Amino acid sequence: MHEKTGMTRLSETQANGLTALFLLLLLLWRILLVQWIDLPLFFDEAHYLHWSLDLNWGYFSKPPMVALLIWLTTGLFGLEEWAVKLSSPVLYTATAFLVWHMGRHWFTPRAGRWAALLFASMPLIGFNSLFVTTDAPLLFFWALTLLLFQQARMQPRQYHRWLLAGLAGGLGLMSKYSMILLPASLLLWLLLQKDRRQELLRPGFWLAVATAFAVFLPNLWWNWQNAFISFQHTAEISQLDRQWFHPLRFFEFLLGQVVVVGPLTAWMGFQVWRNRRAVAATLREKLSLSGWMAWPTWLLLGTLALLSRANLNWAAPATIGFVLLAGAGWACLKHPARWVGLSVLLNLSLLSLFYHWPAVLNALNIPQTAKIDPYHRIRGWDVLGEQAQALLRQYPGYMLTADNRKVMALLGYYTLPGNNHLAYYNAHGNIRNQYAISHDLLRIHRQTGQERFLLFSKQEQPDGLHARFQSVRPLGSIVSQPYPDLTLRLYVFALEGVREALP
């Protein structure tokens, strides 16, 4: 089979080689980019890094996979920002290869290549590749589970395939709780097709479910020991207890999904789905399966956006099924390369503008300000870290302490990278983050006898200090000004003598 690309004809081997080379070069670009643009850690990343220093089966808001990945990459390459972030671009690239494999075997070799290129170049994937989040392992295990599930269906008596599918699904649940949408979507897909319902009577499907549950069981045990705090947090961020019906948020969510997959990809995916009944039955099943990997997720989260709120990235797994639809559609056109190339070029052009925005501003002699820099939320903390280090040297024996998750995460990393001996001052005793569980100041005092703490706070007068400590000495503040219109200030207090009982 040959396909036209410009004025030349490429063999399958050549086309596959160029596609793989493109994906690997894109991976290299994203890894190096973190160093080229001097991209600091986002506070969630610094928070996850502290999780990785104390591996457990669960954490306040997430399962343990992201911590395990950071533990692995920093153990191999050190604690630099690029090493903390490394698993994200690697896993997204691996997911692109899985999408390629599915598209090639479900549709055509060309459809697989197009789907992989569209996935790797999507604005959402390009943006997320710069930050280590739970979405990278979620999408990888989502794609792997889907691939193994379909292979198991084709050979239902080979039970090791169902075991592998269940293992991948369980690891997906250990990455992010929204992985539950995949087995739910697969179950609905089988139930709503008369000729597929009998598959639910076979032991293979339920063997996969049982395997996934067994892999996920340690996280359930951790949650049981911690009052199911992760699930409480998941319910809280949905905000379903607040005012219902937000049509503007719903339309923002829909428009956002078009943006994150790319406009041309969105158009083609919808066209393929609309015309799916006009194709052969064997192909129709694969198109149906691909679509069902997207629509339930979008429908559920679109409803959530209408009733309360839903972040754009929450629907990220839906893009896997959707790019498979789009790849199959592009492969049916007479000259697909120019259209896919245009879509990829458009996506990468937008990403390049985002990636290199500071360099663009410098080239145009435009002063950088917080208002026009998309990275402004993570600038300036390295400077605060240097000042905090100097204070800790002046006060030996004092433990770095904060009363805010963002301050704790970023100041902890840029002051004491790789050091998990931090204390979290929880004035009101509310469990709002992992630090309140694992780094509580009172618990550290009781376990170690630590009496002296150096508190860094955004508040000039933090709540309850004089009631909780025998001695409270204000030490002024540390300041960083990354932009003329942005000043970061933390107030510093030397605390001594923990009071077990409030006066």
Image (cartoon, rainbow, N blue to C red):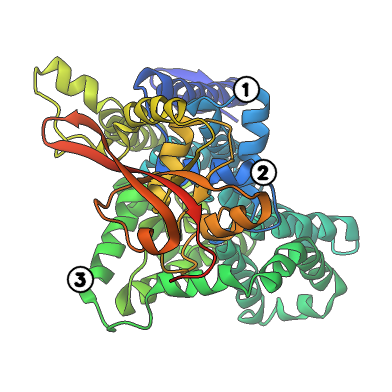
Task: Give the Cα distance between marks 2 and 3.
Answer: 38 Å
- The secondary element bearing badge 1 is classed as helix
Q: Position of residue 450 (x, y in %)?
A: 59, 47
Depicted 224 relative to depicted 1: above or below: below
Depth order, front residue of 475/437: 475
Number of the label disc, if any, that sits on residue 248 = 3
Identity, as a three-letter code, of the amino acid under mark 1: Phe
| Residue 430 percent coordinates (x, y) | 46, 69
Residue ID at (38%, 25%): 386
User: x, y (%) of residue 276?
Assistant: 48, 64
Judged by depth in the image, the label closer to the viewer, 1 or 3, is 1
Q: Is residue 462 left or right of residue 423?
A: left
Q: Which mark is residue 68?
A: 2
The image quadrant of residue 227 is bottom right
* Image quadrant where one finds the C terminus: bottom left
User: Residue at horizontal 64%, vertical 57%?
Assistant: 446
Q: Are marks 2 and 3 in contact (CB under 8 Å)?
A: no
- For residue 125, say whether it is visible: no
Mark positioned earlier in the residue sequence (1 or 2): 2
Given residues 100 and 470, the one toward you in this image is 470
- As helix, strand or loop, the secondary structure at mark 2 comes to helix
